[in-house]
Image: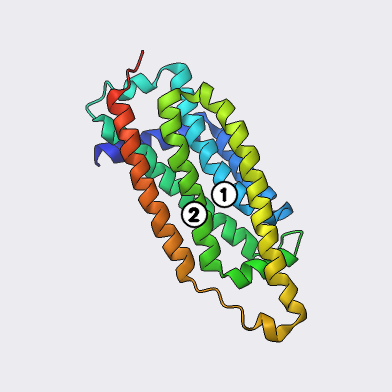
Amino acid sequence: MSNVGLLMRKELIYLFKCLKSTWIISLLFMTVFTLIAPQMCMLATIIVPYFLIYGVMAHEEQSHSNALNHTLPVSRKEVGMSKYLLGLVYSLVVGIGVTLVLRTGLVMEKEYIKVFEQMGWINLSSILIGSALFYTALIIPIILRFGCMKMRMVMFVIYGVLFGVSSVVINIIKEVIVNPFETPEVFAQIQIPSSIGIVFLIGIFICYGLSYGISSNILEKKQINA
């Protein structure tokens, strides 16, 4: 197994054995929040990968175990790559998971199912995964640059903005899409190609790669205190 794979395995073992409450709460948050407030599905998708990534990195910082990574026979770029690949895995799992929860139709506000169906499940899944990836690409360089404790205050501000934006966007889409149900001939003309979500996801992957480059540069210059 490559060094990056071993580093990923180490973090996953640590997450599932030492931070059980983190991933259990994240799973429950994702499921319950999506069912109760489907219009906030984007926020649920964004926050869960953050919980998992931040939880491990915060504990590494507090226990100074992050210094251990830099005593191992691995490069700093490999350390950074392992975190970004895990962020990708988390985003894919959560994005697909939220989509599946929504597809069950068990959400409390049924009218949003019409919105998601008209958007297209591929588009919805692509947008959710892309949003989670974008947020991950945003937070990892900030954590590496400023540390987890300072990052916490920044996140409160970002959460507030994301909560408002997510709610407004979904409600606007709802008004645009659901109202035509009253006039079926207009509704039938609404077509949203699945290529939109795919193009969006490609753009996000480019941003993700740029973020990795920034993080690699930060790690190369960063001094780790044991």
Question: CB of mark 2 within 8 Å of CB of mark 1?
Answer: yes
Q: Position of residue 143 (x, y in %)?
A: 45, 29
Looking at the image, which residue sits at the far top? 226
Q: Amino acid at mark 1?
A: Thr
Q: How is the image coloured?
A: rainbow
Where 114 sits versus 172, above or below?
Answer: below
Bin the neighbour count of mark 1 within 10 Å (Cα to Cα): few under 14, some 14-19, many 20 and up.
many
- Badge 1 marks a residue whose secondary structure is helix
Spatial CA distance of label 2 from label 1 is 8 Å
Q: Position of residue 39 (x, y in %)?
A: 68, 56
The C terminus appears in which quarter of the rendering?
top left
Please give the name of the residue rendered at 68% of the width and 53% of the height, measured from the top-left corner.
Answer: 168
Looking at the image, which residue sits at the far bottom? 185
Quickly name the residue at label 1. Answer: 45
**Residue 78 relative to residue 138: left or right:** left
Q: Is residue 120 visible?
A: yes
Which numbered tag is attached to residue 28?
A: none
Q: Position of residue 10 (x, y in %)?
A: 37, 33
Question: Upstream in the sequence, badge 2 or badge 1?
Answer: 1
**Residue 14 relative to residue 152: left or right:** left
Quickly name the residue at label 2. Answer: 129
